[in-house]
Image: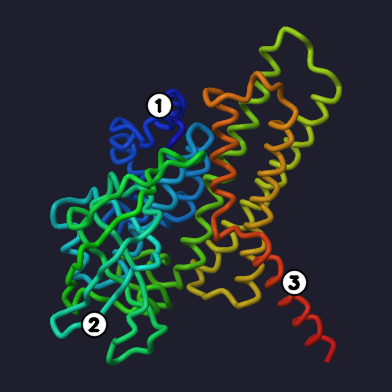
């Protein structure tokens, strides 16, 4: 589905990077094509699994523009949360029409939920809200330390209208600039209690609804955190394609060392592609069986997506490090892909150390138990 738009997105990528946001044309194409509604509860064919298509589509899109792929997988994926609330609230979210876009944001130092008799007070500054400029809704979650029926560490979730928040012009990074991941401020909003949801209830295992796919009933966190591998791999593949094109255009035949480096990176990305398929297939199979991953499976999932990211970074670094200094410009699309890839690789969902240590500890524990 994204293939028809790749040439346009590739042409717009430099301007999107410069403007720090995707163009209105790209957003219109994403909505018209349904690429932002692949897991929407009100899409045309809700019985067909949308999550594998979402991740694979984001991979394809990121070959042309990593920020576009990010919007498909991360921001478009948030629509699945709407179907995990309740029907009355879902109807409110979609009452103006099906095309809706849900941004999210992380809690900052002064972000706060506070229980009051009339509702939940939501205040403070929230960070890294990808797609907020084009969103219609914002999803937030945080602990509520004074909630009368929940522990102080338990988190609540709210969905508030984008029009009710203040968007700060804070996202000015070296990579993934067009995601528009600005901070937002909620100016002491009061959310009624019937629109406040326990996070563990929303994200945990739920009864399957009629006509709904597995993404709306199985624990959702492994799916929404693994979606990041789509734009990561696609971005690296796009960089590799650009490097090969540059070698082909060069009037001087590439030396043996340059060819070896290109082949090495190509092999790494082929291996990363196989790991990508394995990750998607594992989660898809667990979803179809409506089975939650075991702790060991979940840790292996985190390990493998971190390893995939590491291979992508290494593959593109090899190409970039040995390119000439004259090519190291902001206009060079290869270096834009490189900056985008490094920014995505810094995401907590693919953090190398924590994923590797946790997986190794789990495997060692499993081995010791098997010996007894």
Out of 18 and 37, give the one closest to the viewer.
Answer: 18
Nearest-to-viewer mark from 2 and 1 = 2
Q: Is residue 297 above or below residue 232?
A: below
> Alpha-carbon distance for marks 2 and 1?
44 Å
Out of 73 and 141, give the one closest to the viewer.
Answer: 141
Confirm whether residue 47 shows in the render: no
Numbered tag placed on residue 360 in the rendering: 3
The image quarter containing residue 128 is bottom left
Q: Which residue is mark 2?
A: 115
Q: Position of residue 214 (x, y in %)?
A: 42, 67
As helix, strand or loop, the secondary structure at mark 3 comes to helix
In primary-sequence order, the first of circles 2 and 3 is 2
Numbered tag placed on residue 15 in the rendering: 1
Mark 3, other Cα within 10 Å: few <14 / some 14–19 / many ≥20: some
The N terminus lies in quadrant? top left
As helix, strand or loop, the secondary structure at mark 2 comes to strand
Q: Is residue 339 above or below residue 135?
A: above
Residue at 30%, 55% in the rendered image? 184
As helix, strand or loop, the secondary structure at mark 1 comes to helix
> Alpha-carbon distance for marks 3 and 1?
43 Å
Q: Position of residue 340 (x, y in %)?
A: 54, 40
In primary-sequence order, the first of circles 2 and 1 is 1
Numbered tag placed on residue 321 in the rendering: none
Residue at 72%, 46% in the rendered image? 271
Nearest-to-viewer mark from 2 and 3 = 2
Mark 2, other Cα within 10 Å: few <14 / some 14–19 / many ≥20: some
Q: Position of residue 73 (x, y in %)?
A: 44, 50
Out of 342 and 99, give the one closest to the viewer.
Answer: 342
Residue at 35%, 74% in the rendered image? 202
Residue with the most extreme top position: 251
The image quarter containing residue 42 is bottom left
Mark 1, other Cα within 10 Å: few <14 / some 14–19 / many ≥20: some
């Amino acid at each position: 589905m994204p293939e028809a738009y790749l040439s346009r997105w590739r042409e717009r990528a430099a301007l999107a990077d410069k403007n720090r946001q995707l163009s209105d044309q790209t957003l219109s194409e994403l909505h018209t094509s349904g690429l932002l509604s692949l897991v929407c509860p009100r899409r045309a064919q809700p019985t067909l699994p949308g999550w594998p298509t979402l991740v694979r589509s984001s991979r394809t899109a990121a070959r042309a523009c990593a920020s576009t792929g990010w919007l498909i997988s991360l921001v478009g994926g948030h629509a699945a949360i709407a179907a995990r609330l309740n029907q009355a609230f879902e109807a409110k979210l979609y009452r103006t029409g099906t095309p809706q876009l849900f941004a999210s944001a992380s809690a900052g130092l002064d972000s706060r939920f506070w229980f009051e008799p009339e509702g939940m007070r939501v205040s403070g500054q929230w960070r890294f809200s990808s797609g907020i400029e084009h969103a219609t809704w914002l999803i937030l979650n945080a602990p509520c330390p004074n909630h009368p029926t929940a522990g102080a560490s338990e988190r609540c979730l709210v969905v508030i209208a984008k029009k009710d928040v203040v968007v700060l012009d804070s996202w000015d990074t070296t990579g993934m600039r067009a995601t528009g991941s600005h901070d937002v401020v909620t100016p002491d909003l009061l959310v009624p209690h019937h629109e406040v949801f326990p996070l563990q209830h929303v994200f945990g295992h739920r009864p399957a609804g009629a006509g709904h796919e597995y993404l709306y009933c199985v624990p959702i966190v492994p799916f929404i955190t693994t979606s990041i591998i789509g734009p990561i791999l696609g971005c690296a593949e796009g960089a590799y394609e650009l490097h090969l094109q540059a070698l082909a255009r060069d009037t001087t035949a590439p030396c043996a060392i340059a060819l070896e480096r290109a082949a090495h990176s190509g092999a790494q990305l082929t291996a990363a592609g196989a790991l990508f398929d394995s990750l998607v297939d594992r989660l898809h199979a667990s979803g179809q069986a409506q089975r939650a991953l075991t702790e060991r499976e979940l840790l292996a999932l985190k390990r493998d997506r971190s390893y995939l990211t590491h291979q992508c970074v290494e593959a593109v670094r090899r190409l970039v490090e040995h390119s000439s200094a004259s090519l190291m410009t902001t206009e060079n699309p290869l270096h834009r892909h490189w900056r985008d890839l490094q920014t995505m690789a810094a995401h907590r969902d693919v953090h190398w150390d924590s994923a590797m240590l946790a997986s190794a500890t789990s495997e060692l524990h499993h081995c010791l138990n098997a010996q007894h």
